[in-house]
Amino acid sequence: MNAEESYEIRLKVNGRTQHVTAPARRLLSDALRGELGLTGTHVGCEHGVCGCCTVLVDGAPVRSCLTFAVAVQDKDIRTVEGLAAGDGELHPVQEAFKECHGLQCGFCTPGFLMTACALIEQNNDPTEQEITEAIAGNLCRCTGYQNIRAAVRRAAEITRSDKR
Amino acid sequence: MAVGTDSARVDAVDKVTGLALYPADAVPKDALHAVVVFTNQPHARLVSMDLSKTVASPGVVTVVTAADVPVNEYGLTLFDQPVFIGLDDTGRSSVPCDVSRWEADHLVVVVAESLSEARRASALIDTEWEPLPMASDVASAKADEILVHPGSSTNTYHTLQIRKGDAVLGMEAADVIIEGTYELPHQEHAYLQVEAATAWIDEQDRVTVETSGQWVHEDREQIAHALAVDEEEVRVRYAAIGGAFGGKEDMSLQIVMAVTARKLGALGINRSVHCGWSREESIVGHHKRHRATVTARLGATSEGFITAVEADVWLDAGAYNYTSNKVLGNLHLSVAGAYNVPNARIDSRAIYTHSVPGGAFRGFGGPQGAFVAESQMNKLASKLGMDPMELRQRNALTDLSDGITQSGLPEGVGVTRVIDACVERVPPSEELPEYPPFSPIASLPAKAEQLRQGRGYAVGMKNVGFSFGFPEACEADVVFHGDADEERPNRVELFHSAAEVGQGVHTALTQMVAYAVGLDFESVDGFFSDTSTGGDSGSASASRLTFMAGNSVLGAVEEAEKAWADGARPAAGHFRYKPPMTEALDPETGEGQPNFCYGYMAQAVDLTVDVGTGHIRVDRVVSVHDVGKAIHPQMLRGQIEGAIAQAHGYTLSEQLVVENGRIQNPRLSQYLIPGIGDVPARVDCVILEAADPLGPWGARGVSEMPYITYAPAVTAALYDAAGIWINKFPLTPSVVLEHLASAEI
């Protein structure tokens, strides 16, 4: 086996298709950060525990550090850089995390934002239990989670009011 | 934007859009990649090292060793660690470098075109080691049969003592004596952003390191010392910092990357070099909260008045000092609690072992000391059948007290205030509310017959700022901009080195400047954490920045106001704030004034324990803090909630396994920090604002305070629930079950 043999991989990230030349075992997190320069996706533990590297693949939260880039070829990948609108208007989850101080050091934040985005796009009126379950797989070492919980609640509220 | 109101964080938009650049994010395209090779030897002599295969490996640019460090030594407060272990050095260091004393001592840095090439080449290093005998914990190091640093006759290298009144007579006068030996565990910082750095030679020929840390000027000083150059020839700046908590106070990549950049420069290679640690390298490669053993006695009258305290503290410093002497000082001061103690004998010792160094971690010695002091007080209350908060109120320090160091306390002692506020919110006489049942395994029903509820309290105090005579200071610069004919400036620039580790200091300083000048928040532009633009701020540690940096910016604004009034445009103001000088303690009696400011806290914890499985759920925490002034209440609550979550992990789940100097579980899948499902179900913050006479707008500090009292409040609540005292933690289910079994409950 030649681990270094490279392939051309088509990645559709934030609505734009890009080609990455990388070995078959290139992790999605590394491809996003290294090849595509999308460093908003952070790597915290390298083995699927902390959730910092969470991105959306066809709308579902996925650990990009446990995903090979080739495995998500042609799927819709969304990263934190794709949340805000083209004119810079923040996505409701971004607005809410900012407003509710749902972050301190900010390193875990992109992962929480993507996880919360997936929740709220499916269910814009989650219960407390649903919020807890949705973000139970993401670790934050700074906030104690109370403001994160408040931010997810607030993001749902903003989304509901936007729809009206 | 007034102080005392909530603004958006200055870094919020960058952090929610992914634009904030952490040290691993802004790597230049043409950067070289470096790997730091650890010795992987907790105690062994390097016999030989052959780097020829490494150097010849594809893509390798250079290899950096001890021979490349002009002064091969490191240490924040005393030089006792070589930057690199090696066989040839320049001879200019006082620290021998042929013996590895820690598995994460650095051996070489391998620099290559790519990370994979650097890694492959690192695996080709051929070393021969002579294993040496180990003294890997306090018990084995105490005998001094194996010396960790052979230059000295003892491993017990730093001692402190307090002799106040007569402890023997005090104990004789006691109606009740509480005795206990407490085992305090290590804790891993587990900041989510692991260490990374990029280094290069800048356009002014300065060795430049961009990384994340807690004090750019200290990093610069350490680098300059190792390189034997003037500090002006070194530049350190911080990228966004993904958490620190004390774990980034000591050097990780700073010195080795500076040495590497300089070597590349000398080889005529004008390229940046980047290194990022893996999570495993991070956990193995940086210091921990100290483990410690404390034996304590507390004597009191039957009315609950303390007659004497005795304590013997053994702090496991690990292989190198790091900040162990500072941590020991804090533990030493806090082991008697926030109480009037007429007679005391306290002996505290830091001891070298062949194990991971202990160092700074939020509270640094305070949580360890308070666990002892408050466990003793809770046991005393229980033995006397007294309300635990009434007991504390009877003994509480006040402005009139002489304190454990016989020197009086800085004005504004808040112990009684926080006790009163805590009791008002959570009266000890009140019945516990009935919390919903819980099952340790969510998919299984709760077994109500196995659930017991309990409540516990703890009270404490923690210094703000550097102690024991350290020359504490903080600098700030501001520049007012505006037209000559304008009465007031329309824009202000702030230059400050305070490290934004997540706590929000950049936002708070921006807010303070805006308010002091009378501008809106957006009219203040902050330039932070770069030794080439800002003065020395001191560290983001000891809960000191709101107090110290706040005073520094106030002073700088005042200076700029004078210049502005004199017609200067732009009008610059520089200020170096110095608080009242503190003192080192008398070596015999421990007398002296160690601190200039304290924060005060009281906590009540309600929990439910499943006595069938040993699982604990914390139902509610009420955390009372005298903060002087809440500059930004929302960020302040964030500090309290965040500190409690970390303290919760420390108390209940985080178990670092170290065997013979080697960390056995350096992964977040094995070392369990709390998730949202683990943290207390509810945290109520109670903020008191009794102004500190010297604080900016009266502010003290808060970021460590909630940590101090949490563990003893939890163990007291566990006693209330299940009738067992546990003198160690984390309170994992197996530890709880073991104690329940031996108590036959």
Image (cartoon, coloured by chain):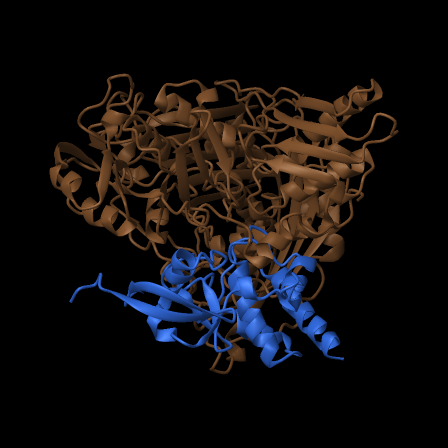
Image height check: is B86 above or below B35? above
- Left or right relative to B489: residue B378: left
Image height check: is B422 above or below A136? above
Count of marks placed on residues: 0
Image height check: is B284 above or below B620? above
Q: Quadrant of residue B275?
A: top left
Q: Nearer the viewer, residue B475 or A19?
A: A19
Please indicate, yes or no, whether residue B725 appears anywhere in the rendered image: no
Image height check: is A93 above or below B86? below
Q: Position of residue B188 (x, y in %)?
A: 42, 49
Q: Residue at x 58, y 29 (%)?
A: B533
Query: The chain coloured brown carries which letter?
Result: B
Query: The chain coloured blue carries which letter?
Result: A
Q: Position of residue B599 (x, y in %)?
A: 66, 38
Q: Nearer the viewer, residue B456 or B387?
A: B456
- Left or right relative to B508: residue B290: left
Q: Nearer the viewer, residue A32 or B220?
A: A32
Please indicate, yes or no, whether residue B75 appears anywhere in the rendered image: yes
Q: Quadrant of residue B548?
A: top right
Q: Position of residue B730 (x, y in %)?
A: 44, 55
Q: Quadrant of the N terminus of chain A?
A: bottom left
